[in-house]
Image (spheres, grey):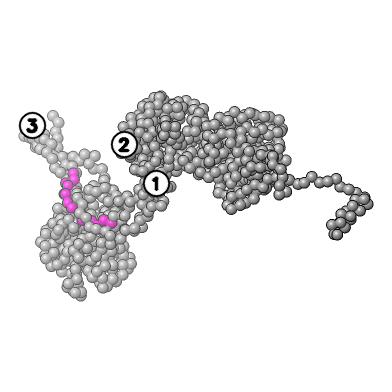
Amino acid sequence: MVLHEQRLSLPSCLLLSVRPSLLVQEILVDHDTILKIKAAAEMMQCSAAVDVLFLLDGSYSVGKGSFERSKHLTLTLCDALDIRPDKVRVGVIQFSSTVRTEISLNSYSSRDKLKKHLKKITYRGGSTQTGLALKYVLKKGFSADRNSSIPRVLLLLSDGRSQGAVQQAATELKQSGVTVYTVGIRYPRWEELHALASAPVEQHVFFAEHYSDAVNGLCTALSTSAVCKAVPPGCKVQSFSCERKTLETVKELQGNFVCWKGSRGSSPYTSLCPFYSYSKKYKIHPAACHRTVCYDPCDSQPCQNLGTCVSEGLEKFHCVCPPGYGSDPHCAPALNLDCSVDVLFLVEGSTALSLEGFMRFKSFLKRFLQTVVGADTPTKIGLAQYGDDVKLEAKVGKHRDVTALLRMVDALQPRGGKAMTGKALQYITRHGFQSSPIFADVHDDLPRVVVLLTATPSTDHVVEPAKYARDREVFIIAVGPEDLKAQLNNITGNPQRSLTYSSPDRLGTKIPELRAKICAVDNQGCLGQPLDLIFVLDGSSGVGRDNFIQLKDFVRSVSVQFDINRDVAQMGLVVFGRRPVTVFDLDTHNSGSDILKAVAEASFLGGAASTGSALLHVHTYSLTVGKGARPGVNKAVVVLTDGTGAEDAVVPAQKLRDNGVFVFVVGIGDLQQESLLRIAGRADHMITVPFYEDLKYFDDVLVQMVCAKRPVDLCRPNPCMNDGMCVLWDSSYRCQCRGWEGPHCETRSTKNPSRGDLPRVAAPRRTGRKGHRDLNRRHTTTKH
């Protein structure tokens, strides 16, 4: 037979030490509100005539550690009190088995001296005679040397486990006009502390482990009771649900067991005995906690479009806005897609792209449309998605209002499959855009833009399909993560049209930049400013056949940025080796597609290079009215060379500049900087490119150089042919011709000379004395 004895059972899991501050009192609010309560406590200050007496429990049940924490709370509370003889006076009493005044109310007139002495108070130990301490406070705590109308406040810091009666003394103290606040220490018995505190209990009970919360609660209560004004301007008092928990030992019957009671003779005497277990459990006391909260002006999230709100006190703030939103104090969208272009968004929906990534693209699209598309936006928008194949979700221009566009985006579902980006670009180029007829024979031939949204590497080749699209005047703007930058640059053909983000949450900041790049297509070239532009390409052996193809691609990339027609931009091309060859003149082609095709067909020449002969050819033949040059229009010549054979080009280049032509040089590789600079004439007309492969990074730079606004001289270069003289005349010009006629002296004259248009044929000149005598004779005859 097994004999059991009655014993205390404490499960180890319940004996683990826990931080009281986490469990003993909880205000049921979010973390941000807790931080605001703490921030408010740091700003609160009670400045009024009031006597405050701290009654510290120094008994054994509290322990030395908790006593030191109650001292720290007292020090913290003193920082929130304006301690002066005519304002707040503070006293400190410690109690355990006996009561002792540590600091009387009139001992110190400054906070620093008071705190210095308070730190020296030592823990005494003993039993918890709270009732005795309250009677002591009633008789000796508050001195009578001050006006009786001054508020008297007692802060009892205790664990609420008093030995002996306390309620009678507390009642008498409160009836005498003292306001009693109780502050729980360690694992307090809240029932006792609630009974000792003044009414309403919710405003007069705190917890010592939460220093900032206790300071906030006390100052809030003092303000509410009109003792002082401690609530900072702009802050307000709020009531929050909270819970206080008492850690109690719970006795539970586990059953009856046979136990030994003694013996009867030789036999043991037994009977059934009850068996109990004891455990520590929390008893919850629901309550309301009144606290002062200072709401930050940034709490309302006043900054739009991922702007960062920076608080400047309780009422002021400013927004740090992402690019494109800085003109508005709240980063409000000041953007509008006010350009006339056709835009097709091509969105990746492959299996490699996570569902989260696809939803991020949808969210970006919706924000973009909400931000930049208005009721009067001239831009037409379409949508396509790709994986293994391409689906045209909405044709360009099908939906014109924002609501319909957003519905279109909401309906998107990922297609799955491989990310066949190259295939998608080729499909969209062929089928994504359709020109709508305005009149019977006129189509709205607007610039076409594909905005590619991708986040995973393409599983097929993208260079050739992207080039195929660009050759057909489709502008590609690619948006993706930074690790895809190389692929995006290969697709766009121009890093200026690649938008990358460092982390997915930064995608939204690209909206202004994307809007700007879309509308930059509409403002291509020189923004409608007329220009006659001639490219002079080095096709010599020094460049080589493969690099010559790179030069042609660069010219093609630049040409698509201009509106090619008779009224705006005209373009010509000259290729040179030892001798120059005109590929096409300024007036040969009147469309961008024709220019692209003609540049691609330019032939490599080989041989030595003579840049001077090429520039002389441009001056003499290419920039003439007969070859399409327009009077009163800026003229620009762009030379692309590696610098070999440039020694003879300085004089012809100067001749062009003297005639009003702007000369630009793009030098590639290890070149002769000084010679090329003398050709360009000035440093800001020269671009140095280290490798032919890097040319694609400089097309926008060249366009900006060429399109810089400059004054136009109608007579420079001379529009008059066959040595005609240009004369400025009444905001225009006219040509003075000799032996030729027409507005530009382009036709040989068939009329007899008059008014000395042609010089008379001189008679044979006579020599010797005879001639002299004849001259004298004629002179004499005339005289008579």
Does dot 3 land on a helix, a strand or a loop?
A: strand
| Mark 1–mark 3 CB contact (< 8 Å) | no
Q: Quick one: SS at disc 1?
A: loop
Q: Quadrant of residue 420?
A: top left
Residue in the image at 54% along x and 35% along y: 590
| Mark number displayed over residue 404 | 2
* Residue ID for mark 3: 267
Count of marks placed on residues = 3
- The mark that comes first in sequence, 2 or 3, is 3
Identity, as a three-letter code, of the amino acid under mark 1? Leu
Question: In x, y percent, where is residue 504?
Answer: 40, 39
Residue situated furthest right in the rendering: 769
Q: Is residue 181 above or below residue 465?
A: below
Tell me which label, 1 or 3, sits earlier in the chain.
3
Q: Residue at x 28, y 67 (%)?
A: 82
- Decide whether residue 75 is among the magenta residues: no
Q: Which of marks 1 and 3 is in front?
A: 1
Q: Where is residue 367 in the image (x, y as percent from the top left)?
A: 35, 41
Which segment did they paint magenta? 281-294
- Asked whether 27 or 79 is in front, the reply is 27
Looking at the image, do the residues carrying marks 2 and 3 touch, with CB atoms under 8 Å apart?
A: no
